[in-house]
Amino acid sequence: MPSPHEILARTEIFVRGRMHGDGSGHDWWHVDRVRRTALRLAREEGADPYVVELAALLHDVWDHKLHAGDDSVAPREIRRWLQEAGAEEPVVEQVCEIVAGVSFKGAGVATPMRTPEGAVVQDADRLDAIGAVGIARAFAFGGSRGRPLHDPDTAPDLHATFDAYRAGAGGTTHHFHEKLLLLRDRMNTAAARRLAEGRHRFMEEFLRRFHDEWNGEDAWS
Ligand code: ADP
Ligand code: NI
């Protein structure tokens, strides 16, 4: 039976190979940041670091956004990968549950995490969607989908269902109102809430300047 250390090492090599070079903000370095943040939060929360690290490593490999909107792919493929790597069944179960529940699914859709391991992975993933890195990732993702930076002719939409959120269009600045500015108040852990505060304020400042420049109101006043 391979050790947890061996299973983590094999998984890391696999994920690096799969996600290397992605241009939509879901590259290997996103996964690496989420893993590091999740492990730090896990220490504070007393969550199992092995399950947390495996879930963080695998959380975006078969993401619905990157797989034609199909969210049954991830649990199936993760189960197969972990079983072939020799992980024990309770670990496989926990990782599949976390990855299935981790994603944001729309402003009006609750996405509670049942376990401390799930809570810290979700917080780490959400922290990487906000702040300076989050801003960069949002525009990279929008660009990868052919979206304009900003669409002044339409308004953001606080989607009530996952399907409506998935189908959402519009410029990338809408995404700040539809998701990114909502995340600070949806963190599961106290440590993540503290980190989110500064990142949230930076996004607000960014949007203020963006709109001032867009409207030609910055240099003239
Ligand atoms: P989640 O599973 O919660 O969506 P991910 O780590 O998979 O989290 O990726 C979310 C990233 O994708 C965020 O950085 C977010 O800004 C970006 N993203 C998702 N949808 C959009 C969108 N419609 N416009 C711009 N960026 C988006
Ligand atoms: Ni992610």
Image: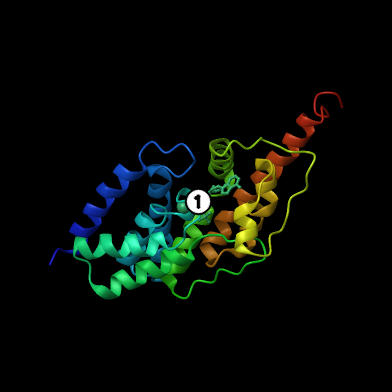
Q: x%, y% of residue 35?
A: 38, 54
How many discs appear?
A: 1
Q: Which residue lies furthest to the left in this view?
A: 1
**Pick the front one: 3 or 47:** 3
Q: Residue at x 65, y 45 (%)?
A: 203
Q: Looking at the picture, how far across and down is residue 78, in whole percent?
A: 33, 61
Q: Which residue is drawn at 53% across and 56% down?
A: 126
Q: Is mark 1 within 8 Å of ligand 1?
A: yes
Task: Locate the N terminus by quadrant.
Answer: bottom left
Specify the farthest residue to the top: 220
**Vertical comparison of 17 with 80: above or below:** above
- Whether residue 113 sits left or right of residue 205 in the image: it is left
Q: In this view, does 74 lie above or below 130?
A: below
**Nearer to the camera, 22 or 204:** 22
Q: Is residue 14 left or right of residue 132?
A: left
**Which quadrant holds the C terminus?**
top right
**Residue with the mark numbered 1:** 65
Residue 169 drawn above or below residue 87 = above
Q: Where is residue 148 in the image (x, y as percent from the top left)?
A: 66, 35
Determine if residue 44 is in view.
Answer: no
Residue at (42% x, 39% y) in the render: 22
Residue 120 is situated, as x and y percent measured from the top left of the image, at 45, 64
Identify the residue at horizontal 72%, vertical 35% (top origin). 210
Q: How is the image coloured?
A: rainbow
- In the structure shown, which secondary structural element does the residue marked by tag 1 occupy? helix
Question: Mark 1: which amino acid?
Answer: Lys
